[in-house]
Image: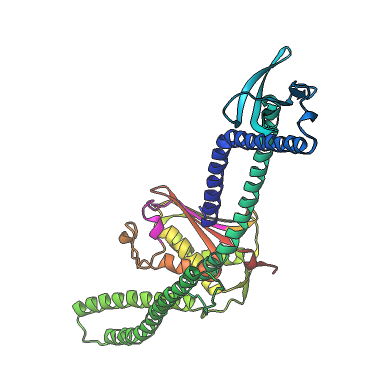
């Protein structure tokens, strides 16, 4: 899971937790808000009555000792004023049921004592709890809608901010790790960011890449130089052995030893040439200016290798359903690629086996498959078949140096060809080459 996704997921979950808690606490919060609002209304009504009494006098409400009481038409609020004979002074707000005519209604009541002309009066202002509770539901809905809207806005804001903050990290991964051709990384380009951690990461990756690149360049240089240097003494030794064969006085026993030496030198020369070829491919020392159809290329491979098919009585079938043209390629290298794959299919095949080569268009991709009925490759060996000098169990029984498939891999990467391998032990192996559209053109 991507870091951006994790951050967004965490923010979303945390906000959902907040929403859940808020929803659970919302009734209590709304009830307290409503009650405080109602109490403020009662106090304002009280102040209004007291101001009227102060301005117009108590007789505006009480005449001939009779108390005053006024209800709204639906009895959801009332104001009452009467003389108070109690000793204690009241200034309270409480809930109480009152019987009004035939109805019993629960009110939120403010009771307040005050004096006018040395007489004590009790003022009551009441609002029915039913009318108070009528606003609770709408208030809860409004509060919930506002909360959900704010949550959505904050999630969007978090997503945008995460994209902005993590942008340099994605750029580092894309340009420094994913978008580079290993181990040729090119020159260093600083990723602009105000985040110190990303700046440190960018510099650390560059330093690591420099170390890796330097190590690979030294390895390539060593292989290239060693291969060049070895070719000269090998050629000299071969010439000396060939000259010794021409001497008449040489004994038969010595000739046998010389033949063994010559065989060893041939093996050493083959390994040296192969290493030199791999080094030249990896250092981009080959041009890609050739043009050839896939049918012609496969036919040339067959003409070169057909004699080896006869040794094991292996049947060979080449199916070219779409004879496309390869452009901007190196014909010599591609020939070596197919030659090595077909040669391996012969080498590790059984007697009277089969080899089928298919050049087809598959899911808008140009594909060549080399299918054999050989010994196959064990599942545990598949990840290592392209490693240099990695000799698998079946190759130990053959005259193999473990360099055939590494050459195939190097040539494929040089041409941007994807290789997929499927194999079943003691049944068959299939090497699938997928050509990029940039290699396909008109002849």
Question: What is the tally of numbered marks visible in this picture?
Answer: 0
Which residue is nearer to you in this view: 363 or 338? 363
Residue at 39% across, 81% down: 218
Residue at 56% across, 63% down: 165
Residue at 69% across, 39% down: 142
Task: Answer yes or no: is residue 185 visible.
Answer: yes
* Quarter containing the C terminus: bottom right
Give the residues drawn in magenta, as a range.
Answer: 368-385
Q: Position of residue 359 (x, y in %)?
A: 59, 57
| Colour style of the rendered protein structure | rainbow
Instruction: Relative to 347, say whether 70 is above or below.
Output: above
Q: Residue furthest top?
A: 102
Which residue is nearer to you in this view: 51 or 193? 51
Which residue is nearer to you in this view: 220 or 128? 128
Q: Give the left or right position of residue 308, taking residue 90 as reference.
A: left
Q: Give the left or right position of residue 9, taking residue 70 as reference.
A: left
**Is residue 376 magenta-colored?**
yes
Task: Answer yes or no: is residue 360 visible.
Answer: no
Q: Position of residue 49 (x, y in %)?
A: 74, 34
Q: Position of residue 187 (x, y in %)?
A: 52, 80
**Is residue 334 magenta-colored?**
no
Q: Position of residue 87 (x, y in %)?
A: 57, 26
Residue at 43% across, 55% down: 313
Q: Residue furthest front?
A: 118
Instruction: Relative to 27, say whether 96 is above or below.
Output: above
């Amino acid at each position: 899971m991507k870091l951006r996704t994790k951050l967004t997921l965490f923010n979303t979950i945390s906000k959902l937790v907040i929403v859940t808690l808020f929803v659970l606490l919302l009734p209590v919060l709304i009830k307290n808000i409503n009650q405080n609002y109602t109490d403020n209304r009662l106090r304002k009504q009280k102040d209004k009555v007291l101001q009227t009494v102060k301005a117009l006098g108590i007789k505006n409400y009480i005449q001939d000792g009779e108390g005053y009481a006024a209800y709204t038409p639906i009895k959801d609020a009332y104001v009452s004023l009467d003389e108070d004979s109690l000793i204690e002074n009241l200034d309270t707000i409480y809930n109480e049921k009152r019987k009004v005519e035939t109805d019993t209604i629960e009110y939120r009541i403010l009771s307040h004592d005050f004096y006018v002309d040395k007489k004590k009066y009790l003022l009551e202002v009441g609002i029915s709890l039913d009318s108070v509770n009528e606003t609770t539901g709408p208030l809860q809905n409004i509060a919930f809608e506002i909360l959900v809207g704010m949550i959505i806005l904050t999630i969007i804001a978090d997503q945008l901010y995460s994209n902005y903050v993590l942008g340099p990290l994605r750029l580092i991964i894309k340009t420094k790790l994913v978008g580079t051709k290993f181990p040729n990384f090119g020159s260093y380009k600083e990723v602009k960011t105000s985040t110190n951690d990303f700046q440190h990461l960018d510099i650390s990756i560059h330093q690591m890449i420099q170390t890796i690149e330097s190590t690979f360049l030294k390895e390539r240089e060593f292989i290239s130089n060693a291969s060049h240097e070895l070719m000269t003494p090998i050629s000299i030794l071969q010439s000396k052995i060939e000259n010794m064969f021409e001497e008449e006085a040489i004994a038969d026993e010595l000739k046998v030893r010389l033949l063994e030496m010559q065989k060893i030198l041939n093996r050493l020369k083959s390994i040296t040439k192969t290493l030199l070829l791999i080094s030249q491919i990896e250092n981009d020392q080959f041009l890609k200016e050739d043009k050839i159809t896939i049918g012609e290329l496969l036919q040339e491979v067959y003409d070169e290798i057909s004699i080896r098919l006869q040794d094991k009585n292996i049947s060979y079938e080449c199916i070219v359903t779409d004879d496309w043209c390869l452009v901007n390629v190196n014909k010599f290298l591609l020939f070596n690629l197919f030659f090595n794959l077909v040669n391996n299919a012969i080498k590790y095949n059984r007697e009277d086996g089969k080899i089928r080569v298919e050049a087809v268009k598959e899911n808008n991709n140009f594909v060549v498959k080399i299918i054999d009925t050989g010994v196959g490759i064990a599942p545990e060996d598949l990840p290592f078949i392209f490693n240099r000098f990695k000799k698998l169990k079946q190759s130990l029984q053959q005259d193999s140096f473990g360099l055939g498939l590494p050459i195939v891999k190097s040539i494929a990467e040089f041409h941007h060809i994807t290789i997929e391998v499927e194999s079943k032990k003691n049944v068959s192996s299939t090497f699938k080459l997928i050509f990029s559209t940039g290699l396909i053109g008109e002849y």
